[in-house]
Image (cartoon, rainbow, N blue to C red):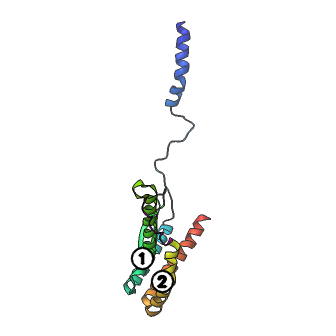
Amino acid sequence: MRSIATILVLLLAAPACLQAQPNAAQPDDPEEVIVTGNRDLLALRTRMLDAERQAYDVFNSLNDDRRFEISCTEQEATGSRFRNQLCQPAFVRNAAAEHGRAFWENLRAYHDPATQDINPPPPAVPYEIAVQRHQRAYQDKMKQVAEQHPEFLEALVNFVEAREQYEQARGMAAE
């Protein structure tokens, strides 16, 4: 009986003993791992984003209409850690803020029992319409500033060239 127990213990312990011993057939672990990446692509992307900010900074210094003042922010998409630069004129940001405010006011009015006997808030102008109202004037202002100020036109050309170089390099990296 004792020999059967000894055999069972040895059989059960054998896999653990085998794992603890180094395998002579496998080569030694490498001392270092070298990861190669495309730093040129990162540099081109950084250059493109900087050129975009610079072009809009020049535009803002020459623009006299506050509706068209452009600001750039970095945002992360939900569920992602990658940050993207988003540059928008003030009228787009204001339309988005008004749209969100109207949504929450209507939601509160619908669900709040204290406001059920009061008239609901008037509907807000849809986001798309609010943006479209200013779009033509915004394009005209950009064109006017570009025609009157060569430094803005030069900054735009630098941005477009940087974006094309980045997109071309990105296309090659994907292949």
Expressed as whole percent of the image width and height from the top left, the position of residue 172 reads 59, 68
Q: Going from the N terminus, do you reach mark 2 or mark 1 first?
A: 1
Q: Considering the image in quadrants, where does the N terminus appear?
A: top right
Q: Is-magenta flag for residue 80?
A: no
The outermost residue toward the right is: 175
Does residue 4 lie above or below 16 as drawn? above
Residues rendered magenta in the picture: 117-126
Q: Secondary structure at mark 1?
A: helix
Q: Is-magenta flag for residue 120?
A: yes
Q: Residue 90: which numbered mark, if any?
A: 1
Reading the image, the residue beneath label 2 is 138
Magenta stretch, main secondary structure class: loop
Q: Secondary structure at mark 2?
A: helix
Expressed as whole percent of the image width and height from the top left, the position of residue 29 reads 50, 43
The outermost residue toward the front is: 117
Q: Are marks 2 and 1 in contact (CB under 8 Å)?
A: no
Q: Residue 7: which numbered mark, if any?
A: none
Tell me which residue sits at (48%, 83%) in the image: 138
Does residue 121 lie above or below 161 as drawn? above
Disc tally is 2
Please state which of residues 12 and 19 is positioned toward the viewer in this rendering. Answer: 12
Does residue 6 lie above or below 131 as drawn? above
Tell me which residue sits at (42%, 62%) in the image: 118
